[in-house]
Amino acid sequence: MSDVELSQTPPLSIRARHAERSIIRELLKLAGQADVISFAGGLPSPKSFPVKAIEKATDWVLETHGARALQYSSTEGEAALRKAIAEHDAELGVPTDPDCIQIVSGSQQALDLAALAYVDEDSLIAVEDPTYLGALSAFRLQRPKFITLPTDDYGLNPDKIGPEFRGIRFAYVIPNFQNPTGITLSEERRIKLAEKAREYDFWILEDNPYGELWYDKQPPKPVRFYAPERTLSLGTFSKVLSPGFRLGYIVGPKAALEPMTTIKQAIDLHTSTFTQLISARCLDKGLMKKHMPEVRELYKTQCQCMLDAMDKYFPEGTTWTKPDGGMFIWATLPDYIDTDEMMHEALKRKVAYVPGSAFYANTPKKNTMRLSFVTVPPEKIKEGIKVLGTLIKERIDAHK
């Protein structure tokens, strides 16, 4: 045998060398234990899955379009699904051309395609502060530079967007029940953001995974309604139908979609024909109108349960958002508390959350945490929040 040490892998690409494991995925491994109360994952409640409706739609697709459903499809996506999405948008007051919709394998692929098509090394991308960790992971593979959009207690503040944003590749925003904060952008601020995009000639990448998860009042129209010529909107069926389908879509000007369509064709040819046709059938049968009210009520109840528990158990000096929809509450603790460090003790006490530092593109704030309430039953929400409240109080008392 030779004494030469052989490499264990082929030489890694630049993208692979800079890829980082998601803290959320690593946490989910720990939080997946049966005895852990997990507020960590952004997973929809299994109670929200319309199993019977999907079963009926699946039977219909196989009986009516069986051979087609099991065949290859076009890269752009099945016409039936794009038509159903366009009709749903029209019902919300947002005119949409089916030809201006690109079907993707989950909105996470949409983020990756946007980065591959429009971001080079050292390109400037604007993101909210904090923002969705999965978007940061997708964008970072292209090695861009991030500029943070100014935010306050009401979310993104477009009044403070100035000339420094001229020339950015795009501004990535989550206007509805934002991940991780749960904040919803007002209509006034959406209009102002559209005006700023025109003034400083940048595009908007609008992510809307939670828009259907409102509790009492539907959110304002998407930013795309106010700036259709420079907005790419991302949607997904993961939160309203089935995350296992891995089905999402991008809506925007056809010329802006074409580069992403070309790249998608090189990556995976097309998204599953089978799940596209099943989803189209579910939409055509009015699933959103029949099914979503139950999901909204479920999430509203869970959210209020967590808010009530935080009012009872979280000590003075902590603050948190009060979302009108979605899946998350964002808590801010005294600035001397490090939630990365506190997480380890929380896991010892069988409670999991996501430290807020993971959601910042540049300078993290380590005294924050994201709490998801949708998969935890009310009695466990109260128990878990009580544990976290005790942990926070211990650290406040130790600092006195």
Image: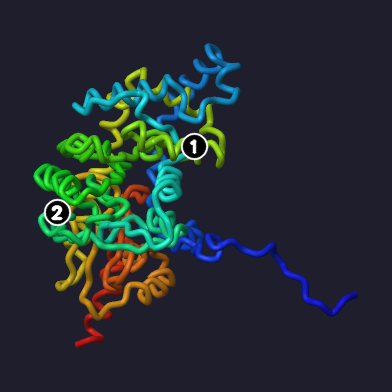
The image shows residue 292 at horizontal and vertical percentages of 29, 31
Quarter occupied by residue 134: bottom left
| Residue at mark 2 | 158
Q: Quadrant of the C terminus?
A: bottom left
36 displayed left or right of 39: right
| Residue at mark 1 | 262
The image shows residue 257 at horizontal and vertical percentages of 39, 36
102 displayed left or right of 330: right
**Residue 267 or residue 51, whichever sits in front:** 267
Which residue lies most toward the right here? 1
- Looking at the image, can residue 31 be seen? no
Which residue is drawn at the image coordinates 43% and 54% (left, top)? 138
Which residue is drawn at the image coordinates 53% and 33% (left, top)? 270
Q: Is residue 191 above or below residue 40?
A: above
Which residue lies most toward the top here? 64
- Which numbered disc flags the more N-terminal residue, 2 or 1? 2
Q: Secondary structure at mark 2?
A: helix
Quarter occupied by residue 191: top left
Which residue is drawn at the image coordinates 84% and 79% (left, top)? 3
Do the CB atoms of the residues marked 2 and 1 lie less than 8 Å apart? no
Q: Secondary structure at mark 1?
A: helix
